[in-house]
């Protein structure tokens, strides 16, 4: 099958498309993640048992019959094939096992055997590899006439794999960092304090104003949850947060115990997801804040909006995304912005988990059109947005994965580039790491910015 959309691979200015396509034909696992489960020490920390046996898989897989979503999605697929070329991994590899229906078929045949399922029918290597190549982006579900959500199937299968200790190393290492420090990057309170001080000093130099980034302030009204990457790497994003909170005169703080908007539990299992969400709830309660404000992270916001929000509500604490805070402030004239500070043509990229799982589509657009001179929309936006190719824990900087993620992220970059925009804007910590890499690999004349970065450049403080 050669769907038309795959032709976009040849449009890459990298000149590497032919070589990549040839590789897909010849090497079976060229684009597959090798089963490289977490090291024993990490697994022990996460509290899981390590046992890669097909026998154990069969035992646990049978338990998925308790999941209504899994059973319904297994039973209702008509094999119409509409979803196949909607997946960025199928577009980039042409491998049907890497398409929504193909991926589901890997386990559907096991599911259909019911109690007769035998360990000898299970190809654990294949299941581990393909189920860790789904970014859980849910794009396929938007096009499926039956409403089948492959990400939900992936989450169920990964529950089983995680219980067996079969977690890709990068995901396991990140989970382990969160258990130790409360953030993905493994920053201890001293490292956070020094990074924050550096950014604070830079802002003072740039603006001549004492714009604080309060850390561990007792009795603040607002607990702000940034991504740890905002603290260490995406400093312009952190400045954007601080300037908005400063302009609104909010009594806020970041906590060194829970400085992580992301939630890699989403990519492992429900128990870890809830444990990480509960860490924030406990900290908010301990600090006695009235509201939690969430920073820029796609899947992290999805988790916050669909789980943390309700746990916080039990304690009488509300939750808002920083875009909701900023968009309202702009609308009410509480902050002043100068769009000439961002004098370029900008294209907003909807992160999957904001648009398809976090109800955050309008606020970012309102903010962007207020803080930049000109915007343009791409062909596939909002719920039809393409995934960056690095969600689901696939941002691993591993030698045999880098090329795959460069091509998996190409559809999103291609359609943004096609608009003629010079700057692609995305409010997601994973996108901020992935898109500059994809843009560089494909030699596209573009740059990538976070939305709050642009707010920070435009706001008058
Ligand atoms: S579009 Fe839906 S029903 Fe059709 S093959 Fe894909 S998952 Fe099955
Ligand atoms: S959820 Fe995304 S990555 Fe997974 S099969 Fe669907 S389109 Fe592909």
Image (cartoon, rainbow, N blue to C red):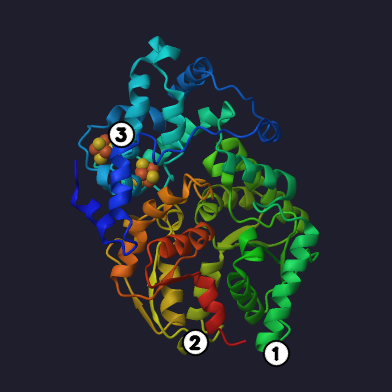
Quadrant of picture, ligand 1: top left
Label for residue 277? none
Q: Could you say where residue 398 lies in the image, as x and y percent from the top left?
A: 53, 47
Q: Which residue is mark 2?
A: 341
Q: Which of the marked residues, 1 or 3, is nearer the chain's N terminus?
A: 3
Task: Pick the residue in front: 33 or 68.
Answer: 33
Q: Which of the marked residues, 1 or 2, is nearer the chain's N terminus?
A: 1
Q: Is residue 302 left or right of residue 388?
A: right
Q: Secondary structure at mark 2?
A: helix
Q: Secondary structure at mark 3?
A: helix
Q: Is residue 415 above or below residue 326?
A: above
Measuring 48% from the left and 60% from the top, which residue is drawn there? Answer: 431
Q: Is residue 88 left or right of residue 338?
A: left
Q: Could you say where residue 282 lies in the image, as x and y percent from the top left?
A: 72, 49
Task: Pick the residue in front: 208 or 361.
Answer: 208
Q: Which residue is mark 1?
A: 208
User: How far is mark 2 from mark 3, CA to CA?
Assistant: 47 Å
- Judge the density around disc 3: few (<14), some (14-19), many (≥20) Cα neighbours within 10 Å: some
Quadrant holding the C terminus: bottom right
Q: Which residue is mark 3?
A: 102
User: How far is mark 1 from mark 3, CA to CA?
Assistant: 57 Å
Task: Pick the residue in front: 62 or 447.
Answer: 447
Q: Could you say where residue 259 lies in the image, as x and y percent from the top left?
A: 68, 57
Q: Is residue 270 above or below residue 259?
A: above
Task: Pick the residue in front: 178 or 327.
Answer: 178
Q: Could you say where residue 67 lies in the image, as x and y percent from the top left?
A: 45, 28
Q: Is residue 274 above or below residue 305?
A: above
- Judge the density around disc 2: few (<14), some (14-19), many (≥20) Cα neighbours within 10 Å: some
Q: Secondary structure at mark 1?
A: loop
Q: Which of the marked residues, 2 or 3, is nearer the chain's N terminus?
A: 3
């Amino acid at each position: 099958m050669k769907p038309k959309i795959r032709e976009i691979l040849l449009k890459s200015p990298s000149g590497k498309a032919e070589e990549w396509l040839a590789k897909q034909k010849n090497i079976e696992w060229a684009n597959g993640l090798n089963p490289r489960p977490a090291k024993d020490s990490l697994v022990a920390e996460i509290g899981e048992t390590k046992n890669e046996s097909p026998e154990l898989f069969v035992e646990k897989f049978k338990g998925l019959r308790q999941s209504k979503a899994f059973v319904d999605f297994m039973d209702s697929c008509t094999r119409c094939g509409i979803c196949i070329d909607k997946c960025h991994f199928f577009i980039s590899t042409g491998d049907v096992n890497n398409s929504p229906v193909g991926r589901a078929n890997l386990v559907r045949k096991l599911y259909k055997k019911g109690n007769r399922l035998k360990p000898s029918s299970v190809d654990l290597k294949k299941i581990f590899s393909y189920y860790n190549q789904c970014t859980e982006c849910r794009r396929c579900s938007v096009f499926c006439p039956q409403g089948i959500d492959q990400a939900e199937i992936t989450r169920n299968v990964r529950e089983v794999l995680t219980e067996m200790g079969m977690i890709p190393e990068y995901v396991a290492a990140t989970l382990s960092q969160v258990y130790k420090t409360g953030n993905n990057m493994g920053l201890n309170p001293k490292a956070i304090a020094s990074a924050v001080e550096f950014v604070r000093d830079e802002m003072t130099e740039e603006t001549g104003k004492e714009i604080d980034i309060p850390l561990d302030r007792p009795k603040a009204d607002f607990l702000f949850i940034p991504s740890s990457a905002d603290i260490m790497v995406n400093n312009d994003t952190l400045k954007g947060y601080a300037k908005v909170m400063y302009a609104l005169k909010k009594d806020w703080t970041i906590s060194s115990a829970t400085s992580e908007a992301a939630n890699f539990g989403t990519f492992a299992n429900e128990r870890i997801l809830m444990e990480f969400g509960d860490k924030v709830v406990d900290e908010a309660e301990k600090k006695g804040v009235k509201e939690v404000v969430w920073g820029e992270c796609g899947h992290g916001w999805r988790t916050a909006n669909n789980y943390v929000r309700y746990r916080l509500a039990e304690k009488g604490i509300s939750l808002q995304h920083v875009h909701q805070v900023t968009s309202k402030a702009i609308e009410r004239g509480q902050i002043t912005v100068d769009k000439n500070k961002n004098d370029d043509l900008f294209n907003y990229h909807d992160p999957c988990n904001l648009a398809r799982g976090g109800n955050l589509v309008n606020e970012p657009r309102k903010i962007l059109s207020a803080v930049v001179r000109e915007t343009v929309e791409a062909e596939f936006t909002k719920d039809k947005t393409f995934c960056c190719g690095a969600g689901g824990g696939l941002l691993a900087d591993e030698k045999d994965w880098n090329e795959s993620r460069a091509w998996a992220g190409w559809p999103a970059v291609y359609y943004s580039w096609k608009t003629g925009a010079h700057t692609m804007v995305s409010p997601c910590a994973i996108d901020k790491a992935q898109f500059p890499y994809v843009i560089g690999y494909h030699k596209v004349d573009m740059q990538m910015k976070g939305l709050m970065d642009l707010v920070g450049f435009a706001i008058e403080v």
